Image (cartoon, rainbow, N blue to C red):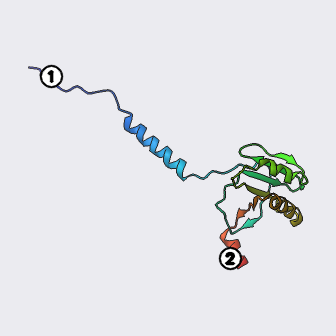
Amino acid sequence: MALKRSHTMMAAFSMASMTDVIFLLLIFFMVTSTFVFPTALDVTLPQSTQQTALKPTIRLYIDNELQLYTAVGDESPVPLSTDALSTWLRSKLVPDEQLSVALYADETVPYGNIVDVLNAGAEVGVKVVLATRPVSTSTVKRYL
């Protein structure tokens, strides 16, 4: 006498729990990652041990040929003369908002050119922050 099985095997696989896991991983990586503005210009930044939490809305670049470039948001950098910088910054001001500007100056740029850009920002009332690259711990120990 042949006995039949009363249970049949299901060939389907539920993907609902796998979708939940993938969604949670996606949220985790989005929250823990940092947003970095890609620099379109080849600028070698000086080193610094200090950091700021300020997120700039405008980026200024001074390359090793002393050419000034400006970029807003994700736009690509556009050349600009230092004389027209104050006028350009005034055009970007929005009432009741603090405008923050990051200055990416090559480490070979003379200090006077950096001061010219800082003065243009101060003239308009904009906070300009000099961007640097982090110092390694061996370099910090050498300075101390």
Q: Where is residue 72 in the image (x, y as percent from the top left)?
A: 75, 46
Determine the residue positioned at 86% across, 47% down: 79
Give neighbour class at mark 2: few <14, some 14-19, many 20+ (Cα, 10 Å). few
Inspect this view and state whether residue 144 appears: yes
Q: Is mark 1 on a helix, strand or loop?
A: loop
Q: Which residue sits furthest bottom?
A: 144
Q: Where is residue 45 in the image (x, y as percent from the top left)?
A: 77, 60
- Measured in 3D between alpha carbons, the distance from the residue under mark 2 to the one under mark 1, in whole angstroms, is 79 Å
Q: Mark 2 points at which residue?
A: 141
Q: Where is residue 39 in the image (x, y as percent from the top left)?
A: 75, 50
Instruction: From the viewer's side, name the closer residue of 41 and 80.
Output: 80
Determine the residue positioned at 71% across, 46% down: 73
Instruction: From the viewer's side, name the closer residue of 104 and 121.
Output: 121
Residue 78 to residue 104: above or below: above
Number of numbered discs: 2
Q: What residue type is labelled 2?
A: Lys
Could you say which quadrant of the image residue 2 lies in?
Answer: top left
Could you say which quadrant of the image residue 108 lies in?
Answer: bottom right
Image quadrant holding the N terminus, namely top left
Q: Is residue 38 left or right of residue 21?
A: right
Q: Are marks 2 and 1 in contact (CB under 8 Å)?
A: no
Image quadrant holding the C terminus, namely bottom right
Mark carried by residue 69: none
Q: Which residue sits furthest left?
A: 1
Point out the tag, 2 or 1, that comes first from the N-terminus. Answer: 1
Instruction: From the viewer's side, name the closer residue of 61 and 14.
Output: 61
Q: Name the residue under label 1.
A: 4
